[in-house]
Image (tube, rainbow, N blue to C red):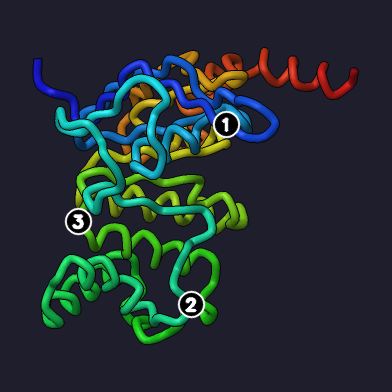
């Protein structure tokens, strides 16, 4: 069998503090091929972001192992591009220089950096804003810059932590459409964290449903629908209903705890 692009092998992550231990993830296993789109979905506290940070190399597993192309992850790498909800742009740099940052660190020449920035700013529709600063942009535009900056490193894996969560509903749908267009132009493995069932079903090839206390995978749902998808189509809403039923017991449990 071919080596998976990503292998998460029986990973447990425990955090230690003055208040004791907290197990964020327990015995999580996942395989993913290249050129696929996976959403990690679940309620707050189910370990989605912790798992993403482990794959990024920002954290180390307490137990188990994570491999990319058969090689254990030993820290962050430009081959794994990360996009955060809060954009994380450098406010003192122009849009162009934000996108050039990774290529600059990797030692590209000025001509190469400019070509890479021009390419990806064109892909996200922001060529005319290259000399603007982040504070001059809308939320959706800032997120486009963040995506362009991650793509400029030419990663084989993209990791996105609720990248559209802070946007209004209309802008969020526009960004979903645009991101699918981008991912079709340069296919790669995408791991996308979201709270939104509708967003997960609209975007993903697979939806990994997680539950909490501790975080674990409770379902791996293949979304067997071609793109582009109609958000209101019966087959789309059927998948969303199936996934909501998987999450419903935990919602009820949390509601009961809140009422106690």
Q: Nearer the viewer, mark 1 or mark 3?
A: 1
Q: Quadrant of residue 213?
A: top right
Residue 80, numbered label: none
User: For the point 58% across and 57% down, which residue is it?
Assistant: 167
Place of residue 186 in the rendered image (x, y in percent of width and height, measured from the top left): 20, 51
Rendered view: 112 above or below 175: below
In the rendered structure, the answer to whether residue 108 lies left or right of residue 191 reads left
Dot 2 corresponds to which residue? 91
Earlier-in-chain disc, 1 versus 3: 1
Mark 2 residue crowding within 10 angstroms, few (<14) / some (14–19) / many (20+): few
Dot 1 corresponds to which residue? 16
**CA separation in Å, label 1 and label 3:** 35 Å
Dot 3 corresponds to which residue? 154
In the rendered structure, the answer to whether residue 180 lies left or right of residue 5 reads right
User: For the point 27% across and 58% down, which residue is it?
Assistant: 151
Name the quadrant of the C terminus.
Answer: top right
Which residue occupies the foreground of this view, 166 or 237? 166
**CA separation in Å, label 3 and label 2:** 23 Å
Q: Are marks 1 and 3 in contact (CB under 8 Å)?
A: no
Q: Quadrant of residue 126?
A: bottom left
């Amino acid at each position: 069998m071919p080596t998976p692009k990503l292998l998460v092998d029986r990973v447990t992550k425990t955090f230690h503090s003055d208040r004791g231990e907290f197990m964020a993830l327990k015995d999580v296993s996942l395989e993913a091929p290249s050129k696929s789109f996976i959403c990690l979905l679940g309620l707050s506290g189910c370990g989605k972001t912790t798992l993403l940070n482990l794959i990024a190399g920002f954290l180390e597993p307490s137990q188990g192992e994570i491999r990319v192309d058969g090689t254990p992850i030993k820290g962050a790498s430009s081959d794994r591009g990360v996009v955060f909800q809060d954009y994380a742009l450098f406010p003192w740099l122009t849009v162009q220089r934000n996108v050039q940052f990774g290529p600059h660190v990797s030692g590209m020449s000025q001509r190469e950096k400019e070509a890479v920035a021009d390419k990806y700013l064109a892909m996200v529709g922001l060529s005319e804003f290259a000399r603007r600063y982040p504070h001059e942009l809308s939320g959706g535009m800032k997120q486009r810059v963040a995506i362009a900056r991650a793509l400029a490193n030419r990663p084989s894996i993209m990791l996105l932590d609720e990248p559209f969560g802070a946007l209004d509903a209309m802008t969020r749908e526009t960004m979903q459409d645009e991101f699918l267009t981008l991912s079709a132009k340069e296919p790669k493995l995408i791991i996308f964290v979201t709270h939104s069932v509708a967003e997960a079903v609209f975007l993903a090839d697979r939806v990994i449903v997680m539950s909490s206390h501790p975080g674990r995978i409770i379902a791996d749902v293949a979304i067997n629908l071609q793109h582009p998808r109609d958000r209101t189509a019966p087959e789309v809403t059927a998948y969303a209903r199936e996934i909501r039923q998987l999450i419903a017991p935990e919602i009820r449990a949390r509601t009961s705890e809140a009422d106690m």
